[in-house]
Amino acid sequence: MSKATITVNENGNLHIHIPMFVKRSQGRKVIFAPQTLEGKNADMPDIVQSAVVQSLARAFSWAELLERGDIKSVAELARSLYVDSSYISRTLKLTTLAPDIVEAILNGEEPDGLSLSKLVLSFPADWTEQRAHFGFT
């Protein structure tokens, strides 16, 4: 992210640029500056939910393995990873999310309260219905 700057316009007005990040927390919007005068802001939250992003990455990676034929089935993938096949299936379902929902999650712009546990539950196949279901406007 860029640093805060102050410039004087030709008309004498000040132009102040302060990079910031807005994160919803418990229904309220909180503004964080990534840097303070002392340097990096230690109170700056993670922009993305790493568990959700990691699950999305796994889902798309596993789907690619299955599509290429490197792995023949969900059961074979589960055996090779020493996990239950239902976990693989739940995670693979994330590949059916609307592309803009995936992008919003990767950018940390998901609606407040959206979590991995909500994402792996049943959700509509239709992308428009998904947006409404998960609170994307």
Image (spheres, helix red, strand yellow):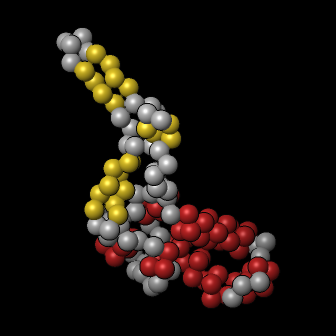
Residue at (28, 24) in percent of width and height: 15
- Quarter of the image where one finds residue 109: bottom left
Position in image of residue 127 (x %, y %): 39, 70
Left or right: residue 98 versus residue 28 is right
Residue drawn 33% across and 50% down? 31
Quadrant of the frame with the C terminus: bottom left
For residue 77, which quarter of the picture? bottom right
**Percent from the top left, x then y, of residue 134?**
36, 73
Q: Where is residue 52 in the image (x, y as percent from the top left)?
A: 53, 68
Evaluate whether residue 76 shows in this view: no
Which of 102/37 is in front? 37
Residue sitting nearer the eye, 128 or 43:
43
Residue that appears at 21% across and 18% down: 13
Residue 137 versus residue 6: which sits nearer the camera? 6
Q: Where is residue 8 in the image (x, y as percent from the top left)?
A: 28, 16
Is 110 above or below relative to 69? above
